[in-house]
Amino acid sequence: MAKVKKVKLKLKTHKGAAKRFKITGSGKVMRHHSFARHILTSKASKRKRRLGKAAELDPTNVGQVLRMLPYGN
């Protein structure tokens, strides 16, 4: 009888999530701000600076995102 090799299945990365979230070396999930793309003339410079920087994802959503990114992109 021939030996049957057991193969562990690979998990697929959710490509939409991979484009939106990054996982840092320490394991934090980072996201970008909304409201930073157009109609910027009516927004204060301070607000626009803050919107340009990445923010840490809220802990309530981290589990969902980590399931979509099984290899930590």
Image (cartoon, rainbow, N blue to C red):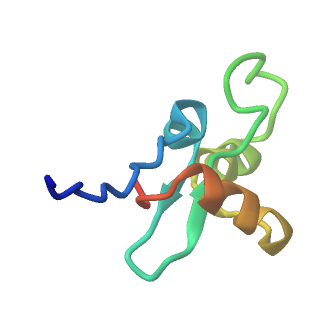
What is the residue that sits farthest to the front in this orientation?
1
Question: Which residue is pictured at 36% across the width and 58% down the height?
Answer: 8
- Residue 58 is situated, as x and y percent measured from the top left of the image, at 79, 67
Numbered label tally? 0
Could you tell me which residue is drawn at 37 percent across and 76 percent down?
A: 25
Q: Is residue 53 above or below residue 45?
A: below
**Picture layout, residue 32 above or below residue 38:** below
59, 69: nearer the viewer: 69
> Which residue sits furthest top?
39
Front-lying residue, 12 or 23: 12
Q: Position of residue 66 (x, y in %)?
A: 61, 61
Q: Residue at x 39, y 49 (%)?
A: 10
- The spot of residue 45 in percent (x, y) is 69, 42
Residue at 15% over, 55% down: 1
| Picture quadrant of residue 54 | bottom right
Instruction: Identify the residue at the far bottom of this view.
Output: 26
